[in-house]
């Protein structure tokens, strides 16, 4: 008799039951538990600068709330991510709970690392579009670029690819300008 290979899917409840003493970060993608490596120093520096600029703009205009990792975004019982930075508009505050975001943030920012770059560019791009994230920024520390993607009828469409010498603009934040020379 041959053994059956069963792919066991985890749920958000399983995910939340991981020991609190666990120092690693995890995401739940289609029920599969994925370990996310700790970001390096340059990644952290970029994240801090972007969050600072974005938070100042958003708080000054009273547009919503900005969060950084680790903070769960639960799209479903089998899809839970921890984006590097995310924004929830005042109109969507209902998705904010004490323990997680329950639904699609308005903006998600992922900063690429060698271990996550392919997943962030492909799988998460599709996942975020499927659940209705309005805007997705993919930050490439090696190339010193930020690709701003805006949701369209068939998924994300590139709004702009900004390099270190450019000034980033965002479709969901009229008036926001970020000089990328101050980020990279």
Image (spheres, helix red, strand yellow):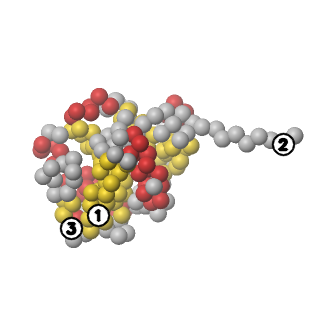
Tell me the residue that label 3 is attached to. Answer: 166
Mark 3 vs mark 2: which is more N-terminal?
Answer: 2
Q: Quadrant of residue 157?
A: bottom left
Q: Nearer the viewer, mark 3 or mark 1?
A: 1
Q: Is residue 67 visible?
A: no
Instruction: Say which element carries label 2.
Output: loop
CA distance for labels 3 and 1: 9 Å
Instruction: Say which element carries label 1.
Output: strand
- Within 10 Å of the Cα at label 2, are there few (<14), some (14-19), or many (20+) other Cα atoms? few
Q: Which mark is residue 161?
A: 1
Placement of 168 over or under 34, stated as above or below: below
x 22%, y 53%: residue: 170
x 31%, y 65%: residue: 145
Mark 2 vs mark 1: which is more N-terminal?
Answer: 2
What percent of the width, then of the height, locates residue 9? 60, 37
x 37%, y 48%: residue: 155
Tell me the residue that label 2 is attached to. Answer: 2
Residue at the far right: name it. 1
What percent of the width, then of the height, locates residue 33? 55, 43
What percent of the width, then of the height, locates residue 69? 37, 46
CA distance for labels 3 and 2: 59 Å
Q: Which mark is residue 99?
A: none
> In front here: 21 or 94?
94
Mark 3 vs mark 1: which is more N-terminal?
Answer: 1
From the viewer's perspective, tell me whether residue 139 is left or right of residue 54.
right
x 87%, y 40%: residue: 1
CA distance for labels 2 and 1: 52 Å
Q: Is residue 179 visible?
A: yes
From the viewer's perspective, tell me whether residue 15 is left or right of residue 48.
right
- Within 10 Å of the Cα at label 3, are there few (<14), some (14-19), or many (20+) other Cα atoms? some
What percent of the width, then of the height, locates residue 86? 31, 45
Give the quarter of the figure containing the C terminus.
bottom left
């Amino acid at each position: 008799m041959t053994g059956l290979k069963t792919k066991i899917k985890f749920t958000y409840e399983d995910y939340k039951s991981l020991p609190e003493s666990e120092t690693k970060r995890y995401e739940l993608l289609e029920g599969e538990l994925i370990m996310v490596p700790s970001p390096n120093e340059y990644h952290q520096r970029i994240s801090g600068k972007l969050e600072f600029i974005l938070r100042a703009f958003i708080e000054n205009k009273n547009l919503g709330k900005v969060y950084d990792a680790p903070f769960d975004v639960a799209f479903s019982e089998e899809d839970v991510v921890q984006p590097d930075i995310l924004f929830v508009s005042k109109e969507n505050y209902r998705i904010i709970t004490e323990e997680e975001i329950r639904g699609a943030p308005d903006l998600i920012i992922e900063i690429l690392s060698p271990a996550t770059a392919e997943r962030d560019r492909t799988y998460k791009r599709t996942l975020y579009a499927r659940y209705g994230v309005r805007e997705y920024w993919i930050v490439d520390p090696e190339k010193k670029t930020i690709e701003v993607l805006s949701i369209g009828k068939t998924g994300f469409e590139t709004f702009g690819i900004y390099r270190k010498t450019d000034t980033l603009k965002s479709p969901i934040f009229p008036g926001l300008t970020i000089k990328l020379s101050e980020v990279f």
